[in-house]
């Protein structure tokens, strides 16, 4: 198993995530838009420069946190390119990783995004195998519940995980997440990507759950924790 964390939207609460990733020495990727049309505050350039480290990296998330399927295709290039230029000017180096707002895309959009980025991540769940192309996560760190996990596992043809869900019933979402990680750790070819939003962690008081997971990873799966920049090299 290879394990990677990424967080979307660049909310101010990311500062607490920066500290946790440093504390537990677990790499995390943070996808940051230039601004957020939904009205959410975005972290400042100074916060990004101060936070970037061995365990904190940054990627693109469009100029305005725009769902790219909601705008004319001729506007997609500028949404993607302008945000990349913004981040590269702040950080002083190439920014190679991108997350699609809302996970929304089509093939035409992907062609444009890949002009600028090496990796593109969706907002899926219950995907456990990576054979190249778009990166699709396994777990959303948010209590989506059994029904959501089951439906996404079925849609993504994660049949082994479907069986696992049926044979390990529980109402504790995060207990189930830990069991899924333990199961995935036994297969060398699994790529387990966990994603979320710091503002959700704050709103739903999930910080203790995340720190419990980080403790478990540090104690049991530390060597499997992957720098996001290496994702496209995983086979």
Image: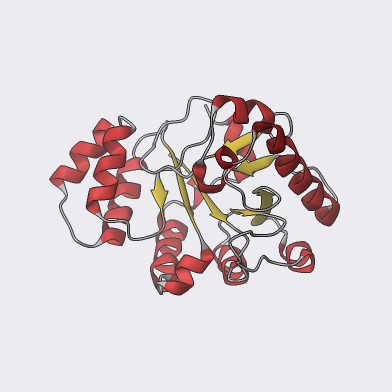
Specify the quadrant of the image occupied by residue 150: top left
Asked if residue 196 is positioned above or below residue 201 in the image, the reply reads above
Is 126 or 64 nearer to us in this picture? 64
Q: Which residue shows up at 43% across the image and 42% down it?
A: 124
- Left or right relative to 180: residue 191: right
- Left or right relative to 199: residue 164: left
Residue 226: x and y in percent read 55, 45
Residue 77: x and y in percent read 73, 35
Q: Which residue shows up at 81% across the image and 46% down it?
A: 85
Is 51 or 33 nearer to us in this picture? 33
Residue 233: x and y in percent read 60, 30
Residue 229: x and y in percent read 65, 41
Is 198 or 174 nearer to us in this picture? 198
Which residue occupies the extreme front position in the image? 72
Q: Which residue shows up at 79% across the image and 68% down it?
A: 46
Asked if residue 123 is positioned above or below residue 77 in the image, the reply reads below
Q: Which residue shows up at 56% across the image and 38% down it?
A: 69
- Left or right relative to 101: residue 170: left
Total number of numbered labels?
0
**Quarter of the image that includes the N terminus:** top left
Asked if residue 77 is positioned above or below residue 26 in the image, the reply reads above
Give the colour scheme of this rendering: secondary structure
């Amino acid at each position: 198993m290879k394990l990677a964390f990424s967080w979307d939207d660049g909310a101010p609460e990311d500062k607490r995530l920066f500290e946790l990733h440093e504390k537990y020495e677990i790499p995390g990727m943070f996808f940051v838009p230039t601004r957020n049309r939904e009205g959410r505050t975005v972290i400042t350039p100074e916060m990004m420069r101060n936070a970037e480290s061995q365990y904190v990296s940054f990627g693109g998330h469009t100029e305005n946190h725009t769902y790219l399927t909601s705008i004319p295709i001729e506007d997609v290039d500028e949404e993607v390119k302008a945000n990349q230029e913004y981040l590269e000017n702040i950080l002083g180096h190439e920014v190679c990783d991108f997350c699609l707002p809302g996970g929304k895309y089509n093939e035409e959009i992907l062609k444009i995004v890949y002009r600028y980025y090496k990796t593109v991540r969706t907002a899926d769940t219950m995907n456990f195998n990576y054979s190249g192309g778009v990166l699709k996560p396994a777990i959303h760190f948010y209590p989506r519940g059994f029904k959501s996990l089951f439906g996404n596992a079925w849609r993504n043809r994660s049949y082994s995980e479907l069986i696992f869900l049926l044979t390990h019933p529980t109402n504790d979402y995060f207990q189930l997440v830990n069991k899924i990680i333990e199961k995935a750790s036994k297969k060398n070819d699994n790529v387990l990507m966990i994603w979320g939003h710091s503002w959700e962690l704050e709103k739903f008081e999930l910080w203790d759950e995340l720190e419990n997971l980080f403790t478990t990873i540090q104690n049991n799966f530390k060597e499997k924790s992957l720098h996001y920049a290496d994702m496209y090299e995983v086979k």
